[in-house]
Image (tube, rainbow, N blue to C red):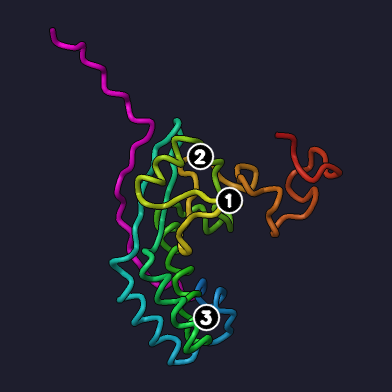
Amino acid sequence: MASPRKKAAKPRHTIEVLEATPYLDMEQFMLLSQSRRLETKDLELADRMLVRWADYLHARRINAAGESYLLIWLDKFVEDEVNATWESSPSQAFTMNSLAQAILMAAVREHLPHVATDGCAPVPRPSRALREALDEVGIRWEEHATLSRQYAMLTPMGGVTGCGACYLKKECPRMTLGEIFSEDPAKGGAEE
């Protein structure tokens, strides 16, 4: 006698590969590298690394628990290269670190232009379905709302914007008590 077939469980998430064009946003790079002007050697290094790291940049749209998220990351290869450079040339490693961050931010703005005007990409609340999707692409949600990749960003897509939607709003160094959440400044933010 044949056993009854189980219905395949509907996936709790979907993952879509997105294009991400690595480019150097000079203003962002200068801000991150804390420079008013860049020396030729720093620009040449940035140009070399931008080309070298192009194939290590990834973008995904994750749909999980009824929400849509943008995940951008650079492979561990980039982390390893930057971390190894700290040993031999801290100034070069600082430039490379700033470049990796600028590449991520440019890729996020490529898909979510409002991030540039908002000045921030909120961190989403990690649902079980979102964690499962992250695990599927090889990135883990870790303590203190960090991702297992040194160079990675995860933010909601769609209509969710601003500090009010951020999982880290109570710990955000950019915010001061009552500045944005005026409901009850004495409690340090809006009621959840």
Q: Which of 18 and 150 is in front in this view?
A: 150
Give the dominant element type of the magenta stretch: helix, strand or loop.
Answer: loop
Above or below, 89 relative to 128: below
Instruction: Specify whether 95 is left or right of 171.
Output: left
Mark 1 falls on what kind of element?
helix
Q: Which residue is drawn at 47% across and 86% down?
A: 92
- Mark 3 and mark 1 residues within 8 Å of each other at the beta carbon: no
The local crowd at label 2, few if under 14, some if 14 to 19, many if 20 or more residues have their Cα within 10 Å, is few
Q: Earlier in the sequence, mark 3 or mark 2?
A: 3
Q: How far apart are marks 3 and 2 (CA)?
A: 35 Å
User: What's the residue type where badge 2 is placed?
Assistant: Gly
Q: Position of residue 39 (x, y in %)?
A: 48, 91
x and y, in percent, of residue 12 in the image: 38, 31
| Residue position for label 3 | 94
Displayed quadrant of residue 51: bottom left
Magenta span of residues: 1-26
Q: Name the residue under label 2.
A: 159
Query: Pointer 1: what residue?
Result: 143
Measured Cα–Cα span from mark 3 to mark 1 = 25 Å
View extreme (bottom): residue: 40
The residue that appears at 34% across and 58% down in the rendered structure is 58
185 vs 84: above or below:
above
